[in-house]
Image: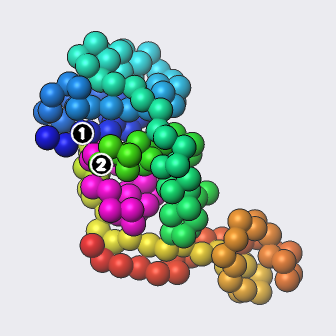
Amino acid sequence: MPRYVADSSVFILGMPLPQSPPNQTVTTPDVFRELKDTQSKIVFEAAVDQGLRIEQPLPHFVSEVCDRARTTGDVERLSETDIGLLAKTLECGGILCTDDYAIQNVAESLGIRTEPIVQEHIKETFEWGKRCTGCGKRFEGSEQVCLICGSRLVGYRKKRKRI
């Protein structure tokens, strides 16, 4: 039976965890730190009481996720928590429960299965690039300002693939 990895939206929305043995559901310590309201913390603690495991991802999986997120152009859209969840899911070969489209985009690229919580699953994956709002030059790095004319850079869909 697969392990499920729970994103913070599972607890924020108060959704039940997938039907699986309790020791098959895991999340990362960063998820609890992301929870701000009392209700989501109560839901989290109830899940822990029912067997939710809290585990830190191994560093080499975090590196692999960061590398892939740079390739897809999602690295700036992902929080440390998002990267940790992807790494933990990759590490345990599990299913990631999340509504976050950037997470789903990187997960698809890594071959990680995701299950949405409330939103629909993504129908396309994207590779993102950056384009200058002034001169139109395209960039691949982490620049925020055009090296040619000094204008602001915005994201654009470099590549699209239907799932």
Identified by mark 2, the residue type is: Gly
Task: Tell me residue 19's x, y (percent).
Answer: 13, 33
Residue 152, numbered label:
none
Question: Residue shown at 77%/87% (left/top)?
Answer: 135
Residue 3, numbered label:
1
Task: Tell me residue 104's x, y (percent).
Answer: 37, 57
Question: Which residue lies under the disc numbered 2?
Answer: 93
Q: Are marks 2 and 1 in contact (CB under 8 Å)?
A: yes
Give, as a single range, the part of the protein colored magenta: 94-113
- Residue 30 visible in this rendered orientation of the protein: yes
Q: Is residue 135 left or right of residue 162?
A: right
Position of the C terminus by quadrant? bottom left
Q: Is residue 52 left or right of residue 144?
A: left
Image: 158 above or below 48? below
Q: Is residue 90 left or right of residue 25?
A: right
Identified by mark 1, the residue type is: Arg
Task: Find the distance from the CA under tag 2 to the CA under tag 1.
Answer: 7 Å
**Quadrant in the picture for residue 39:** top left
Task: Tell me residue 105's x, y (percent).
Answer: 40, 62
* Most foreground residue, 23 or 103: 23
Residue count near mark 2 (Cα–Cα under 10 Å), binned few <14, some 14–19, many ≥20: some
Of callouts 2 and 1, which one flags the residue occurring earlier in the amino acid sequence?
A: 1
Question: Residue shown at 49%/40% (left/top)?
Answer: 58
Helix, strand or loop at label 1? It is loop
* Most foreground residue, 92 or 29: 92
